[in-house]
Image (cartoon, grey):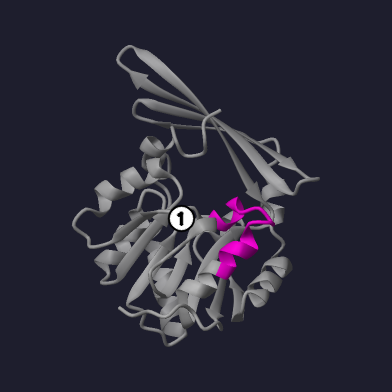
Amino acid sequence: MSRAYSGLAGQYDAFTGDVPYSEFADFYESVFRSRSERPRLLLDLACGTGTLALEMTRRGYELIAADGSADMLSEAACKLAGSGALILCQPMTELDLYGTVDAVYSSLDSFNYLSPGELPEVLRRLALFTAPGGLLIFDVNTPERFRSLDGLISVDESDGALCLWRADFDEEEGCLVYGMDLFTRSGSLWRREQEEHVEYAHGLDWLRHELEQAGFYDIEVVKGPQADAGRVFFISRNGGKGMKNDG
């Protein structure tokens, strides 16, 4: 099987046309207002193909878009051309900025892709590269949601492409493993690619504890876009000193 999001990158937007990106942007801005924040520079962590990043730049924010998949970033680069966004090919565990950002958001269960061993390092880096008092907002799928998907088989179709999706929840490892068979048309033939994705079922209390350990405070767990699909949002402030920003 190929690495996650290699073959899928070119078809990702077609298969996720129902994602309400504008609702996510509205939600983030509502959090900024409720916390009396007016951030200028944002980090879109695990930005994918950049649809939400583009929406945020259109709303007047300066933006850094980071993702560990070069294939997904290739799609994002085309989308964000001329937007002024800085695009970085960096896995979440290797985030390395030149200074601090005013706020960070990470969307569509990107934090579920982090293993329990990786997540504390990501939070440590975010505490370093987020301005003191800056906001961190991310969403996760709950363990209950992942368990409900065990054994599910589904099919997504778009023009010239088909994706067969199979999910299995590993109770011992606490993760959802799903394989994808992606078929794309090439003339009169079909090309088949396979990917495997692993998402971890992080307990909400454990996530709160890890945020506190990394120096984040004023933590809230709230509902937002796609709440009916088992998605919840963590909102917190960085209590660390952050990295000196000479810019």
Q: Position of residue 202 (x, y in %)?
A: 69, 58
- Picture quarter containing residue 38? bottom left
Q: Which residue lies furthest to the left in this view?
A: 82
Q: Where is residue 224 in the image (x, y as percent from the top left)?
A: 52, 67
Q: In this view of the protein, can residue 232 be seen by the observer?
A: no
Chain part drawn in magenta: 110-124
Q: In this view of the protein, can residue 141 be seen by the observer?
A: yes
Q: Is residue 224 magenta?
A: no
- Picture quarter containing residue 180? top right
The residue closer to the viewer here, 188 or 81, is: 81
Against 179, is 203 above or below?
A: below
For this view, does 182 lie left or right of residue 213? left
Q: Which residue is labeled 1 in the image?
A: 46
Name which residue type carries label 1.
Ala
The residue closer to the viewer here, 46 or 182, is: 46
Q: Which residue lies furthest to the bottom in this view?
A: 36
Q: Position of residue 163 (x, y in %)?
A: 48, 30
**Magenta portion: prevailing SS class:** helix
